[in-house]
């Protein structure tokens, strides 16, 4: 499943339950939106391994 951190904007994939963001270690995570999933998949295809999106920021 793909998750987004509400605090730092980090997008990440994990199998199973997640309690905290692997980037900032805060617990304000949620399932990623379809748009966020698409952005992360696009970056992973380009060989980038991480993405942090701040509110209002676009690719």
Image (cartoon, rainbow, N blue to C red):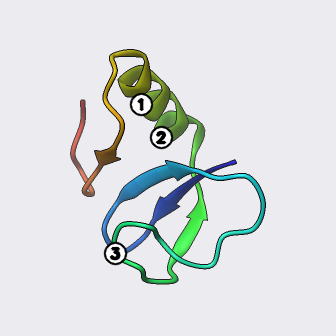
Front one among 44 and 42: 44
Q: CA distance from mark 3 to mark 1?
A: 20 Å
Asked if residue 39 is positioned above or below residue 11 in the image, the reply reads above
- Between label 3 and label 2, give the one nearer the viewer: 3
Q: Residue at x 36, y 26 (%)?
A: 43
Tag on residue 9? none
Front one among 10 and 22: 22
Q: Residue at x 41, y 79 (%)?
A: 25
The residue wearing badge 3 is 24
- Say whether marks 2 and 1 touch (CB < 8 Å): yes
- Picture coordinates of residue 54 (x, y %)? 25, 56
- Picture coordinates of residue 1 (x, y %)? 70, 48
Q: Quadrant of residue 55?
A: bottom left
**Label 1 residue SS:** helix
Left or right of residue 38: residue 44: left
Q: CA distance from mark 2 to mark 1?
A: 5 Å
Quadrant occupied by the C terminus: top left
Tag on residue 36? 2
The residue wearing badge 1 is 39
Q: Residue at x 54, y 71 (%)?
A: 29
Left or right of residue 9: residue 22: right
Q: CA distance from mark 3 to mark 2?
A: 18 Å
Q: Residues within 10 Å of mark 2 (few under 14, many from 20)?
A: some
């Amino acid at each position: 499943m793909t998750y987004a951190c509400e605090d730092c904007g980090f997008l990440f994939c994990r199998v199973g339950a997640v309690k905290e963001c692997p980037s900032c270690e805060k617990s304000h995570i949620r399932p990623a939106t379809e748009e966020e999933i698409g952005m992360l998949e696009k970056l992973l295809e380009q060989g980038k391994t991480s993405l942090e999106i701040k509110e209002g920021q676009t690719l």
